[in-house]
Image: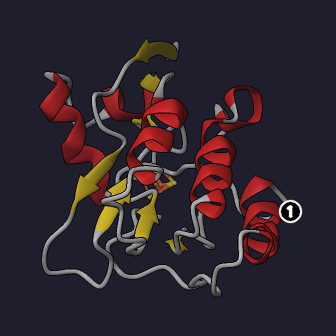
Amino acid sequence: METTVRSMTCKSALNRVRGMEFGWSLNPYRGCAHACVYCFARVTHTYLDLGAGSDFSTHLFAKTNVVDVLRSEVSAARWRHEQVAVGTATDPYQPLEASLHLTRGCLEVLARYRTPVTTPRSSRSSAGGPAARFVSAYPRWMRRSGAGPSRERPPPAIAC
Ligand code: SF4
């Protein structure tokens, strides 16, 4: 089945989360090429008037302005440096990331503005890929920004 990748813009990069151990979520992509049958994030595609079945893995979206929008949000004086969960509705390290680098851009911005993150370590893209590299690099980026350590384990709400 052919996969399409479309650009979309977002008005906000961070989504408020209530009742979880993290205060915000961030998803640079919509849909996921890995197509795990058990993925609970599939339902999020119905918000785009697409199906939760094969549409989730074949109609992918990249939030092309997410890094800039995120920077404006976390550089604001009102930002409280709460925990951000990256990848609650998609694998942020899926194959698209290799060419678009949106997740890396977001993580660099979050580190720059001393924001702790939770990001999946067990994603399908993890083994030896960008997930592993970013997870190991993030504490260094944070230290460079004078921030404390970030979490390394995903909470249950992470999609992968
Ligand atoms: S890799 Fe994660 S986000 Fe992607 S389909 Fe599998 S569980 Fe869902």
Residue drawn at point x = 43 percent, y = 34 percent: 69
Residue 30, given in percent of the width and then of the height, sits at 39, 35
Residue 154 appears in the figure:
yes
Residue 112, given in percent of the width and then of the height, sits at 66, 58
| Image-based side of 68 in relation to 12, left or right | right
Q: Amino acid at mark 1?
A: Gly
- 30 over 104 or under it: above or below: above
- Residue 49 falls in image quadrant: top left
Residue drawn at point x = 27 percent, y = 46 percent: 42
Callout 1: SS = loop
| Image-based side of 131 in relation to 86, left or right | right
Residue drawn at point x = 40 percent, y = 82 percent: 155
* Residue annotated with mark 1: 128
Q: Residue furthest front?
A: 77
Residue 54, given in percent of the width and then of the height, sits at 34, 30
Residue toward you, 24 or 51: 24
The crowding category of the residue bearing disc 1, from other C-alpha atoms within 10 Å (few below 14, some 14 to 19, many at least 20), is: few
| Image-based side of 78 in relation to 64, left or right | left
Residue drawn at point x = 79 percent, y = 65 percent: 127
- 37 over 56 or under it: above or below: below
- 83 over 77 or under it: above or below: below
Residue 71, given in percent of the width and then of the height, sits at 50, 42
